Image (spheres, rainbow, N blue to C red):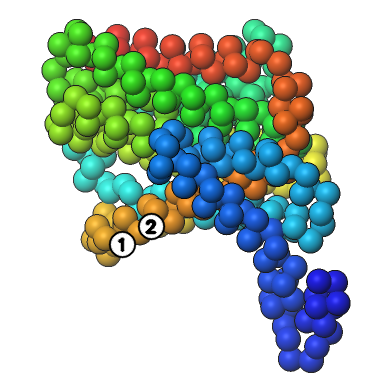
Amino acid sequence: MKSYSAFLRFRPGVGPAVSNLANLWPGFLVCIVVALAATFISDHHGGPQLLYALLIGLACNFLAGVDRVMAGVSVCARTGLRCGVALLGARITVDQVASLGVATGVGIAASVVATIVFGVLLAKLMKRPQVEGIVSGCSVGICGASAALAVSAALPPTKENERFTLLAVVGVTLLSTIAMVLYPLILSVLETPARVSGVLLGGTIHDIAQVVAAGLILGPEAGETATIVKLFRVALLVPIVAVIAVLYRDRSSASVGSRVPAFPAFLLWFLFFVILTSAGVIGAQTAAVASDASRWLLVAAIGAAGIKTNFADLMKLGWRPVVMLLSETIFIAAIVFAWAV
């Protein structure tokens, strides 16, 4: 491999892009295999695809010592993540957001912001770093694992932040799966109207896949409403991550020597895809392809993050982050239920 890479590097007529690709493809291939394995298990045995990718990635941590693999894994964890978040914009249109109405939109936005603030206060109370409250609050308040990864990308890239982000991904995925089963049962017992049920499910469950599944359990009207409400929460990712990036830009520069952009480029792409989808430039079929591509990129990225992280390092975080995620989940459920019912 070293001789082949050297050959590409010094061969006349072969540019640096080809040379870089030669160095990155082993890591890319590992991430693709992890994503395929996670998808196969999820499709054939059920369960959360992202969680499987993370666990398989953690099991492959022995590859962290292989330089020729880690080059591609690091790019996948960073660039693949940003591309996956950007493509989420193809799911959302302005008309979908407007269909919620002002009252519902304001209520959902307020519950998201309140959950993030609650996360920060909870982190302070439990003597945890502020960034942990932000990551956990955003993952619970906005869109689960995708939000945790997106917010982490806008924060100082420290080893501690990476570890907590992975733990947040595990926590919100498990809690979202439990909510997918539990919430529809509770709403059925309470005989809640379909539209109200959709608002409750879309406003409280973390991951969009679980939102859709929970909504359809209660019928098509509840499923459609839940999906639109959830997409509105996903749309809030843009302003919230932009604010976080601005607030932490100077801290990042001081702590790790690299400045975080005031407005991350992947958020601009997110908005660009929202505009194209809203204008009809991106049709339903293309949007579905973009959505699938987004999911694959996020699965590969979380698998790559797992490869870079030692499972023992996650355990060092202790029980407090778990309590934070559970408390934030109960908090947002209580708020949305209080104003929606």
Expressed as whole percent of the image width and height from the top left, the position of residue 235 reads 38, 40
| Labels 2 & 1 near each other (Cβ < 8 A) | yes
Expressed as whole percent of the image width and height from the top left, the position of residue 12 reads 79, 91
Expressed as whole percent of the image width and height from the top left, the position of residue 146 reads 49, 39
Q: Quadrant of the C terminus?
A: top left
Q: Tell me where residue 22 sits by quadrant.
A: bottom right
Q: Residues within 10 Å of mark 2 (few under 14, many from 20)?
A: many
| Residue 205 visible in the snapshot | yes
Q: Is residue 70 above or below residue 116?
A: below
Left or right: where does residue 161 sit relative to residue 86? right
> Looking at the picture, which amino acid does disc 2 mark?
Ala
Q: Residue at x 54, y 24 (%)?
A: 171
Q: Which mark is residue 286?
A: 1
Q: Is residue 124 above or below residue 76?
A: above
Q: Nearer the viewer, residue 45 or 163?
A: 45
Q: Nearer the viewer, residue 290 or 340?
A: 290
Expressed as whole percent of the image width and height from the top left, the position of residue 157 reads 72, 41
Q: Residue at x 80, y 37 (%)?
A: 255
Which residue is disc 2 drawn over? Answer: 290
Q: Residue at x 65, y 47 (%)?
A: 304
- In whole angstroms, how far apart are the C-alphas of marks 2 and 1? 6 Å
Q: Tell me where residue 231 sits by quadrant.
A: top left
Left or right: where does residue 188 sit relative to residue 141? left
> Looking at the picture, which amino acid does disc 1 mark?
Thr
Q: Residue at x 80, y 41 (%)?
A: 256
Per the image, label 2 sits on a secondary structure element best described as: helix
| Residue 153 visible in the snapshot | no
